[in-house]
Image (spheres, grey):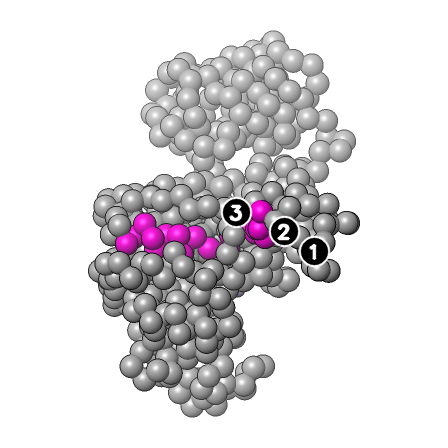
């Protein structure tokens, strides 16, 4: 029989003949036997292979069974007399497929810093941490689709290249085929009519506006794809290329929106706790102590829901000195968000009704004409993880807001059309996939939860 190590480890050690393919993690020699630890990425756990010196000729290859070499092992799966594993393979044959010279192979047994591993991102998937992150990332992608598909949401692919240079969510990367050293000019300005699309184009910062058009026909949709922000913020929470999940729901106000977002987060956490127990145990013991308890607590608790005004009052009356002083009207900084979730409520917090001056033009304006129906979800350790809102569904109010924000209504003619024909209250949110993975795994830096991070001055591999 063949199979993945994950399956093999769940089998009884009853002498079944087994073939396993993987990479050597370690080799240890003891009196009369050689022990190999083999990993194939299907699980964080290794399979122990025992080579008996009394059986000559088992190893069919030149060179050593060094860390990193690829092997095919055949033998019997037996109960392991040793500590630490239930079963092991008693090898009859070990073929070395590819050797890995010790000299020059960076991933020897010692622990490496995440900073160093970023420099060898093509090899870091072979480590415990990055294997675990990759498996959790995959399981989470699956859970995201399950959550929405089970609830009748339609998966919509919104464009990656966009012509609206004013979505307002962040700095954009320009997409052009014009020669940037010497672009064609007209009246001293770049003549974009000669560019590929005949107008200025960029990579999208969000699929929301296009998503709304589909929600206003299919009622419940979601997007899940890459987005791009040219923000020069060298933080542990920002990437230039990241994945976003953006559900949008027609006939849904901000309360329904918060309910879905909360249910969604709990569903994902529960799924990962159930489906990735070994990886989660690794994160709990090696990366962030207590993270399993922490997630379990969140799954069984109600998120705290407060307004922006209440949040500001809480921060002001706390007597804390923040780097950015707090008063009504400021945009909450990460230090404020963390204080609220970590110190005041010790739970995820949903903050609603932000001042309209600090939020996007499309958010529904409240009756006070000062605040909008925004809702951000803040979590301990990270701060903002979800940004959402009920959208403005009144045509004239939306148009006034577009003007008020210094934007051109002509650029949004199709978006305004939604409010002319069969307008409906609708809501949605955007969730950064990598922030979600950071939160679940406890990984500190967002660059370590995506295979090949793209960030300021970072474009290797
Ligand atoms: P922040 O204030 O943290 O920069 P934002 O207000 O710019 O976030 P939104 O425009 O609301 O964020 O985007 C929705 C979600 O996308 C955020 O809640 C966050 O989870 C994620 N996100 C935003 N910018 C980035 C980024 N540069 N890298 C990774 N994830 C991001
Ligand atoms: Mn931002």
Mark 3–mark 1 distance (CA, rounded to whole Å): 24 Å
| In front of the other: 46 or 331 | 331
Q: Is residue 388 left or right of residue 148?
A: right
Residue drawn at 58 percent across, 36 percent down: 126
| Element at label 1 | strand
Near mark 1 (Cα within 10 A), the count class, few <14, some 14-19 or many ≥20, is few
Near mark 3 (Cα within 10 A), the count class, few <14, some 14-19 or many ≥20, is some
Mark 2 vs 1, N-terminal side: 1
| In front of the other: 275 or 33 | 275
Near mark 2 (Cα within 10 A), the count class, few <14, some 14-19 or many ≥20, is some
Residue drawn at 59 percent across, 23 percent down: 70
Q: Quadrant of the N terminus?
A: top left
Q: On the image, numbered disc 3 is attached to which residue?
A: 161
Q: Position of residue 161 (x, y in %)?
A: 52, 47
Q: Is residue 389 left or right of residue 38?
A: left
- Camera-nearest label, 2 or 1: 1
Q: Position of residue 367 (x, y in %)?
A: 29, 81
Q: On the image, numbered disc 2 is attached to which residue?
A: 192
Residue 304 can be seen in this image: no
Q: How many marks?
A: 3
Mark 3–mark 2 distance (CA, rounded to whole Å): 15 Å
């Amino acid at each position: 029989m063949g199979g993945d190590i994950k399956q093999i480890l769940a089998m009884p050690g009853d002498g079944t003949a087994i073939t396993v393919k993987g990479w050597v993690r370690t080799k240890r020699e003891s009196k009369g036997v050689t022990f190999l630890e083999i990993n194939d990425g299907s699980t964080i756990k290794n399979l122990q292979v025992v080579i008996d010196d009394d059986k000559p000729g088992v190893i069919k290859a030149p060179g050593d069974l060094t860390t990193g070499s690829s092997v095919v092992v055949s033998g019997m799966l037996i109960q392991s007399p040793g500590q630490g594993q239930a079963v092991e393979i008693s090898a009859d044959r070990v073929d070395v497929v590819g050797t890995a010279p010790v000299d020059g192979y960076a991933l020897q047994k010692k622990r490496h810093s995440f900073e160093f591993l970023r420099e060898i991102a093509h090899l870091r998937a072979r480590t415990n941490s990055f294997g675990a992150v990759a498996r959790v990332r995959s399981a989470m992608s699956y859970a995201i689709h399950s959550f929405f598909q089970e609830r009748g949401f339609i998966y919509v692919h919104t464009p990656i290249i966009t012509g609206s240079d004013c979505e307002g969510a962040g700095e954009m990367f320009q997409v052009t085929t014009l020669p940037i050293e010497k672009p064609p000019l007209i009246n001293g300005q770049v003549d974009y009519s000669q560019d590929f699309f005949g107008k200025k184009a960029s990579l999208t910062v969000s699929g929301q506006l296009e998503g709304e058009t589909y929600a206003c026909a299919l009622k419940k949709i979601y997007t899940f794809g890459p987005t791009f922000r040219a923000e020069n913020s060298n933080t542990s929470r920002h990437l230039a290329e990241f994945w976003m999940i953006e559900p949008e729901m027609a006939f849904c106000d901000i309360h329904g929106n918060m309910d879905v977002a909360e249910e969604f987060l709990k569903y994902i956490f529960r799924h990962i706790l159930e489906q990735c127990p070994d990886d989660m145990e690794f994160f709990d013991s090696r990366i962030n102590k207590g993270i399993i308890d922490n997630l379990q607590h969140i799954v069984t608790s109600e998120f705290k829901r407060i307004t922006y005004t209440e949040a500001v009052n809480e921060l002001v009356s706390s007597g804390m000195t923040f780097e950015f002083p707090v008063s009504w009207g400021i945009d909450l900084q990460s230090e404020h968000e963390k204080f609220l979730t970590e110190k005041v409520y010790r739970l995820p917090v949903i903050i609603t009704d932000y001042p309209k001056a600090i939020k996007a033009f499309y958010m529904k304006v409240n009756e006070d004409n000062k605040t909008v129906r925004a809702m951000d979800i803040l979590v301990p350790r990270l701060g903002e993880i979800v940004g959402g809102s009920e959208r403005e569904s009144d045509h004239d109010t939306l148009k006034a807001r577009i003007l008020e924000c210094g934007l051109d209504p002509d650029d949004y003619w199709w978006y305004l059309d939604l409010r002319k024909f069969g307008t409906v209250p609708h809501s949605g949110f955007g969730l950064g996939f990598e922030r979600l993975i950071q939160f679940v795994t406890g990984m500190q830096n967002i660059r370590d939860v995506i295979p090949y991070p793209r960030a300021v001055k970072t474009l290797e591999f």
